[in-house]
Image (cartoon, helix red, strand yellow):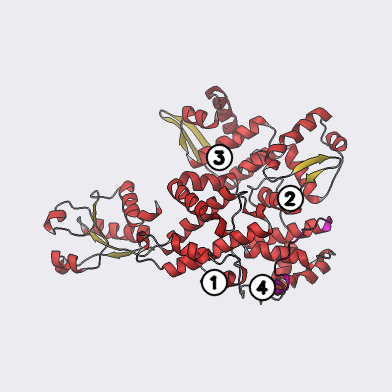
Amino acid sequence: MRQLQLDFMVNSMSTRWIQILNNIEKEPNFTLVALSKRLSVSQRTLGKDINGIKEYFGEHIILCAKQTGYRFEEVNHDCYMDKKADLVKSEILFAVIGQIFRGELKPFQELALEYNYGESSFRRFLLRAEKPLKSYDLKLSLNPVTLVGDEENIRKFFYDFYYLGEYTTHTIQPPKIIHSLILENLSDYLGDYEVGTGVSAAEFYFLVYLMMNRVQQGKLVTLTFFKKQRITKAKDFIMLYSLRDLLANAFNINIPKDEFIWLYLILVAQRTINQIERERHFYSLFNQRPLIKSVAWKYFSNSQFEGWDRKILTDLLSSFLASKSLTYTLHPIWNKQLAEERDQAIVNHSQAYQTNRQFLRQHQKVLGLGEQFFEDVVVEFTLFTNLLLRTYYPKKSVLFLLAGNSIVVQTLYQQAKQRIGHNHRIQLLPLQELTSDRIDAEEIDLVVTNYRPYLWEYSLKKDYLLVNTIPSENDWTRITKQLNRHLY
């Protein structure tokens, strides 16, 4: 369950249960002491919660005590996820947000009566929503109960809560007819894009439905003038705008052209790491800052990137930075990241995050990055560049000098192919070529051996790693880190 969703839960026990499950899904072997510190909950309360969780999920999980703590395991994943989703079934704020999304607006007193709560209790629940909504610059009005704030911010909140949120019994999804309607009428054009987008099919359908839903309620976005005429002549926009008549006929809805421009700009601002020509085209169309490419080039100017394809890296990063600048110009709220993405960048890539933060702060003005959501951009920049480095990391040549019987050697070679063979070149020299001169002559970046005498027998001048006779999981991690040292 996403933190944003947890922030709207009012049942304290259900909230704790989901927090416990979120943690033990990641660390299935745990102790009450460690979990208690992490969640700031007493061990006594946790003990009761764990017993309650075991009883609630029944045969769908294993949650048992060991000498060293507890072990958690999902037995039936689908049933487990269904039961977990049901934990928020009675959450009042989830129901209220759903009514607001659907435009079923009612006064505060009427909703309190409908949900069988006293007015003071219901008001207390609504006050709980103030803090998470404040991060979107939104508020709740009482008569009727609805979201108040900029339309862009309201749409971003719904997008984060429903599309990015974990599925629950309250999750709102696009009608299936939208999916079939688009496929039946536009299948010949889908995929033939000039600029394209990094969004998934599910994300696209949700954004279309979100736009439709808000338009039906008379809630329209206000677009600042941004080369509208040029946008409306773009091939991708023309294809997108062709949905207008299809949606009008199917849903009896008249969607203004500005709404499709909004949707188009949201879509194209999501860039990719593998469609280089489209990224270059996006940059040529939407870049507003003349120094972006030089900043991107500077990011990869470090000597550690010798041997990399810096031109491709620079072009892809330039496109990404142009998209962030564009988003700041049109709708800054869409730069906002959820807590889990922030944690992933700050915790899992802490060194890169700090380096990137300093780099972006240094070039903040020329990149057109505002102060609001700056930290969120650092998070996305860190995740994007990490993805770039993993995708375009130069292949290394690895020589395995293996000892053992034929089955062991062949098994280790197969393991090497499975674990690192997709990203690097693996070599095994035949017996007649296994000489010091031949090893030195080969273009080899790393030698891996499980036989210590080879270290002095061949006087290795290359970088090498000595592993166990049967390499352990830690050995494979060492090999991977040595090969991908810029990624850790």
> Along the polypeptide, which appears first: circle 2 or circle 3?
3
Q: Secondary structure at mark 2?
A: helix
Query: What number is the disc on residue 109?
Result: none
Kind of element beneath mark 4: helix
Question: Relative to 171, is 24 on the left or the right?
Answer: left
Residue 464 or residue 179, whichever sits in front: 464
* Label 4, label 3: how far apart the Cα atoms are: 40 Å
For mark 3, does the 10 Å Cα neighbourhood hold few (<14), some (14 to 19), or many (20 or more) residues? few
According to the picture, the residue beneath numbered tag 2 turns out to be 154
Q: Residues within 10 Å of mark 1 (few under 14, many from 20)?
A: some
Q: 274 or 283: which is nearer to us?
A: 283
According to the image, label 1 marks what residue? 280
Q: Amino acid at mark 2?
A: Ile
Q: Residues within 10 Å of mark 4 (few under 14, many from 20)?
A: many
Q: Name the front one of labels 4 and 3.
A: 4
Callouts 4 and 3 close, C-beta under 8 Å: no
Q: Closer to the observer: label 1 or label 3?
A: 1
* Contact between labelled residues 3 and 2, with CB atoms less than 8 Å apart: no
Main SS type for the magenta part? loop
Q: Quadrant of residue 93?
A: top right
Residue segment shown in magenta: 216-231
Quadrant in the picture for the N terminus:
top right
Secondary structure beneath label 1? helix
Residue type at the position of mark 4:
Asp
Up/down of 438 relative to 57, above or below: below
Q: State yes or no: residue 285 in magenta.
A: no
Confirm or deny contact between disc 2 and disc 1 (CB under 8 A).
no
> Where is residue 482 drawn, in percent x and y?
32, 54
Amino acid at pointer 1: Arg
**Residue placed under numbered mark 4 in the picture:** 236
Residue with the mark numbered 3: 22
